[in-house]
Amino acid sequence: MGYVFDYSWLADYWGVLLKGVLVTAELTLVGATLGVSLGVACAWARSLGPRWLKPIVATYVELIRNTPFLIQLFFIFFGLPSLGVQMSEIQAALLAMVINLGAYSCEIVRAGIQATGQGQFEAGWSLGMTRFETFRYVVLIPALQKIWPALSSQIVIVMLGSAVVSQIAAEDLSFAANFIQSRTFRAFESYIVATLIYLALAILLRQLLRGVGFVLFPRRSGR
Amino acid sequence: MSLIEITDVRKSFGANEVLKGIDLNVEPGEVIAIIGKSGSGKSTLLRCINGLETINSGSIQVAGAQLAPDELHLKALRLKVGMIFQSFNLFPHKTAGQNVMLSQMVVKKTPKPEAEAMARKMLERVGLAHKFDAYPDELSGGQQQRVAIARALAMQPMALLCDEVTSALDPELVQEVLAVVKELAAEGMTLLMVTHEMRFARDVCSRVVFMHMGRVHEIGPPAEVFGAPKTPELRQFLGAQH
């Protein structure tokens, strides 16, 4: 055990790390926003939407939830260009994350909708609201409130899972750590720093989501 | 022309026929109590009137709005009849005031200040002006039900359907809700209520409908229905009440 820890490379490479952090943060924030939006739309379609739409959404959800994220990413980045669809690494990474989170959050949000009592729907309808208006104004927020902790966890998982996008050379935090250790041969130090940054990002993201919850849900308890 | 015209309405859940040809006309300003054993179809009838249940045959019309399963017809119908539920069904994420404002703004596109003024007026009418900013979970059951009444009234319906509105309430809270309903009746609101409050039905209603096995078994003014029941089924039902 004659290993001597050496963090002097940080002086030269902090800019690379910072850029990686920013890319990871951007992918997470944009990916989570779009992914959850897609998930809400799919949850509506699968539980309340027109009959013809349900099997289409169900197929999408099951396809994504039963295949590896890495393969989905490779398919988008390496597979789609064969059909003439070209994307940058970041675009491909973002698209893969949105599609992935969309499928998982669909099922989470759907659980929240199903946990909403029929009485809430009937109250909305009997006041003259359409089915969609009732979903939008009456059901959605309490449904999200019920599943917010689960949804928050899923968003954090997507943030951590975004490390995989370094495999298509999207220059996120993992890419930065790989790059630094390949230049400095300081694998232990590079990855421990990356680990700590991921940990900090995850804690920060959870707090951010808690804050969003406080804004979105004025009442802490809801039926 | 009657305000509510129910003609030969039949409704089945699977093989079970719950309504076996109901005819009932309700005049403006009438207060009608629907009584009967559980399973006799009284709640189903009420829910058919504003389209919460689809009917198998027959027709229902409220002030010219015909019951039909498409959203346009349903909306037109539901703007004419409000509904109060046994379990209140207030929106938990909105304050009492917002509960009353929401459908005005969404359905009628009423501008916010006017919706708010209407909400304050209606909450005042049910004696809850001071609870405008309270959330449902801060209100008692009786108060929640009164907010639900204000919410329905704010849409200015021509009739109100009340589905066992006091059945989920503690005994001491029943009276405050009945008092509000009584006041509405006195102001000339047309009311159709499924109820187990026989004394209330006797005191306030213009007609009482006794339902039995999916049919209107007896109908008449309360003095007749309660004082001189014609059929053994009604006599048995009234006898079992005490």
Image (cartoon, rainbow, N blue to C red):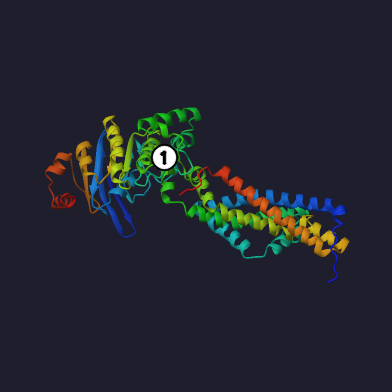
Q: Position of residue A21 (x, y in %)?
A: 76, 52
Give left or right: position of A12 versus B16. right
Whether B227 is drawn above or below A185: the answer is above
Quadrant in which the N terminus of chain A appears: bottom right
Whether B165 is drawn above or below B16: the answer is above
Which residue shows up at 30% across the image and 44% down it?
B166
Q: Position of residue A155 (x, y in %)?
A: 64, 54
Q: Quadrant of residue B225?
A: top left
Q: Which residue is mark 1?
A: A127
Q: Is residue A87 visible?
A: no
| Kind of residue at disc 1 | Leu
Give left or right: position of B166 versus A135. left
Q: Position of residue B112 (x, y in %)?
A: 50, 30
Which of these two is toward me, B5 or B197? B197
Q: Is residue B56 visible?
A: yes
Q: Chain of mark 1?
A: A
